[in-house]
């Protein structure tokens, strides 16, 4: 006594999942219940709201090891979502994906796993952890700057008895535009007490044209560490100009390294330039 539901994601026909008659209510694999968008996968219908059938429980979800997902202009970014869950019969599947937008039924971006089921490991008689791998590709599913920032995590878990639970927005994760930061201190060498001019540029990935462009109007710290020290101290804070350029001056005192440091925003990660050494004579 079983019913078979096929879930389709992109060009992949996801394998059918046979479920007991108790589940023959239109619900099949967890992947078939997840949100979809025509930008990434063919839209197959509305995703149900948060729903639980039976006593399966999600206990924790970790995206990319707790770190932000940073995407540039050419390189694909692969990351993992881990879903831990419990069910009296043990865990059969755990599945998750990211979606962006205000409405789970009509997202403007979806990052889906490369398989229709998680890779699960039992952590006890009634518990398990399942992992899915997702690839964020600036040439495919990261198609616009509007997708930078906070995404929601859709997650589901299924027990060995095919009880299941799904949550539309279990938590959030950030997908960010990769940043670059340069620095150059001159002249080199310089006499003690003379002026050092420190230039640089703050830029970030643009997913609309797959280029890096200056990040304007951002606060950036000029930092310095002595040659004999491992610690940088902040000398001043300046703002990048309309094309991301940085320029300021300071007084040469001792041999050491100058760098710029950017604390980041919700859409762009923090970054520190490699220190530029100046010999003070």
Image (cartoon, rainbow, N blue to C red):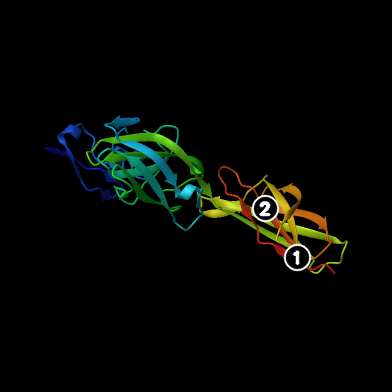
The image shows residue 224 at horizontal and vertical percentages of 75, 58
Compute the Cα span from label 2 to label 1: 20 Å
Q: Nearer the viewer, residue 142 or 242?
A: 142
Percent of width and height locating residue 189:
80, 69
Can you say which quadrant of the picture contains the N terminus? top left
Q: State whether residue 218 is above or below residue 212.
A: above
Q: Residue at horizontal 61%, vertical 47%?
A: 264
On the image, which quarter does residue 272 sit in?
Answer: bottom right
Q: Nearer the viewer, residue 210 or 202?
A: 202
Residue 204: % across, % down: 58, 52
Residue drawn at x 14%, y 38% as measured from the top left? 2
Tell me, for residue 26, which label it has, or none.
none
Element under disc 1: loop
Quadrant of the rendered image containing residue 39: top left
Q: Mark 2 or mark 1, which is nearer to you?
A: 1
In this image, 160 relative to 57: left or right? Answer: left
Residue 11 visible to the viewer: yes
Which is nearer the N-term, disc 2 or disc 1?
1
Residue topped by disc 1: 228
Which residue is nearer to you in this view: 43 or 127?
127
| Circles 2 and 1: CB atoms closer than 8 Å | no
The label shown at residue 261 is 2
Q: Residues within 10 Å of mark 2 (few under 14, many from 20)?
A: many
Q: Is residue 36 visible?
A: no
Q: Which residue is outermost to the right?
A: 193
Left or right: residue 193 compared with residue 83: right
SS label for mark 2? strand
Residue 43 percent location from the top left of the image? 31, 39
In the foreground, 143 or 165: 165
| Residue density around tag 1, few if under 14, some if 14–19, many if 20 or more, within 10 Å | few
């Amino acid at each position: 006594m079983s019913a078979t539901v096929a879930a389709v994601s992109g060009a992949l026909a996801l394998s059918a999942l046979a479920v007991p008659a108790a589940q023959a209510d239109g619900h099949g694999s967890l992947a078939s219940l997840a949100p979809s968008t025509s930008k990434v996968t063919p839209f197959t219908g509305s995703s149900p709201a948060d729903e639980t059938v039976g006593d399966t429980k999600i206990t924790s979800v970790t995206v990319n090891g707790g770190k932000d997902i940073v995407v540039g202009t050419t390189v694909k970014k692969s990351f993992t979502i881990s879903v831990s869950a419990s069910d009296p019969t043990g865990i059969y599947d755990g599945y998750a994906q990211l979606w962006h937008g205000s409405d789970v039924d009509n997202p403007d971006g979806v990052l889906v796993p490369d398989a229709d089921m998680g890779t699960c490991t039992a952590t006890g008689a009634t518990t398990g952890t399942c992992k899915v791998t997702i690839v964020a590709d600036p040439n495919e599913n990261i198609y616009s700057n509007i997708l930078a920032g906070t995404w929601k995590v859709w997650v589901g878990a299924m027990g060995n008895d095919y009880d299941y639970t799904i949550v539309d927005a279990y938590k959030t994760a950030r997908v960010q535009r990769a940043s670059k930061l340069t620095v150059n201190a001159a002249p080199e060498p310089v006499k003690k007490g003379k002026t050092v001019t420190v230039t640089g540029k703050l830029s970030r990935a643009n997913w609309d044209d797959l280029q890096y462009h200056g990040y304007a109007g951002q606060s950036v710290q000029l930092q310095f560490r002595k040659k004999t020290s491992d610690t940088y101290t902040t000398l001043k804070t300046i703002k990048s100009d309309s094309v991301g350029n940085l320029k300021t001056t300071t007084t040469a005192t001792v041999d050491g390294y100058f760098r710029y440091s950017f604390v980041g925003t919700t859409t762009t990660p923090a970054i520190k330039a490699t220190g530029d050494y100046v010999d003070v004579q």
